[in-house]
Image (tube, rainbow, N blue to C red):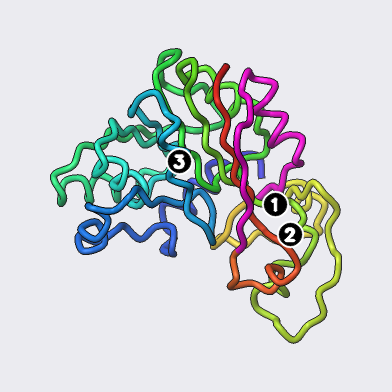
Amino acid sequence: MSNYIKFNENRWNNVNNDYTAPLTHEQLEELKNKPISVALTIGKKVPEEWFEKANGKKILGLACGGGQQGPVFALKGYDVTIMDFSTSQLERDEMVAKREGLTINTVQGDMTKPFPFENETFDIIFNPVSNVYIEDLENMYKEAARVLKKGGLLMVGFMNPWIYMYDADIVWDKPDEELLLKYSLPFNSKELEEEGKLTINPEYGYEFSHTLESQIRGQLKNGLAMIDFYESCDKRNRLSHYGNDYIATLCVKL
């Protein structure tokens, strides 16, 4: 598959799951008088103090369409832009914003290409688990650093790569089968497909585990300094009994 990005885009335009369900009016009402509550990963909310470190409230939700985080930020008084490659996901943000009388700017864009924003535009970039769907992280982190203001914050959630060593079908759908190591890291579903070792399920699309070096050093080498970090787990799968399957990092632009 040469154009895996288009394949994944089509997947997100058509899939319905926990990550594509817009917040209801009732859910937003419950959050109105509470501290900000958003997630970069499954299993844990972002610490409130991460947002307290920001110098301003101009925020880019990077690849986080779907009518979930964006409306919460807008409700809390942030100047919100959501960039996503899925028009369907962006339409969910627009629908919630219109319903609730909120302002959210939506931009259709691809993390593997130059971001359509001027240098030093945002105080915060919020990127929940999504870079698992792109093969190379270099452009994403370079562009994120470029469009952040000096002192701006980059919040990123990503998959702990070790989970990709196991067959996902056995992990999720065959609880009685023994868990065996199957894939070497970094996991690259596009290469495995080309080698005839994997068949891509359109429901999930192409995924890439990435190394911790590409995830963490990818941020550091672009002038970002890590100032906080946490792990979390998705208790719906049995790998979570053995370790945390998500990582979230907070970096500041120097």
Residue 49: which numbered mark, if any? 3
| Residue 45 on the magenta segment | no
State the quadrant of the C terminus: top right
Q: Nearer the viewer, mark 3 or mark 1?
A: 3
State the image quarter where residue 164 is shown. Answer: bottom right
| Residue on which the image places disc 2 | 163
| Residue on which the image places disc 1 | 160
Q: Nearer the viewer, mark 2 or mark 3?
A: 3
Say which amino acid is labelled 2: Ile
**Element at label 2:** helix
Residue drawn where x is 27% and y is 55% of the image: 31
Asked whether, in this view, residue 178 is left or right of residue 189, the answer is right
**Element at label 1:** loop
Asked whether, in this view, residue 222 is left or right of residue 115, the answer is right
Residue drawn where x is 39% and y is 57% of the image: 20
Q: Nearer the viewer, residue 82 or 90?
A: 82
Q: Earlier in the sequence, mark 2 or mark 3?
A: 3
Instruction: Give yes or no for contact between labels 3 and 1 (Cβ–Cβ under 8 Å).
Output: no
Q: Residues within 10 Å of mark 2 (few under 14, many from 20)?
A: many
Q: CA distance from mark 2 to mark 3?
A: 29 Å
**Looking at the image, can residue 38 be seen?**
yes
Count of numbered labels shown in the rendering: 3
Say which amino acid is labelled 1: Asn
Q: CA distance from mark 3 to mark 1?
A: 23 Å
Instruction: Give yes or no for contact between labels 2 and 1 (Cβ–Cβ under 8 Å).
Output: yes
- Give the residues drawn in magenta, as a range: 207-233
**Element at label 3:** helix
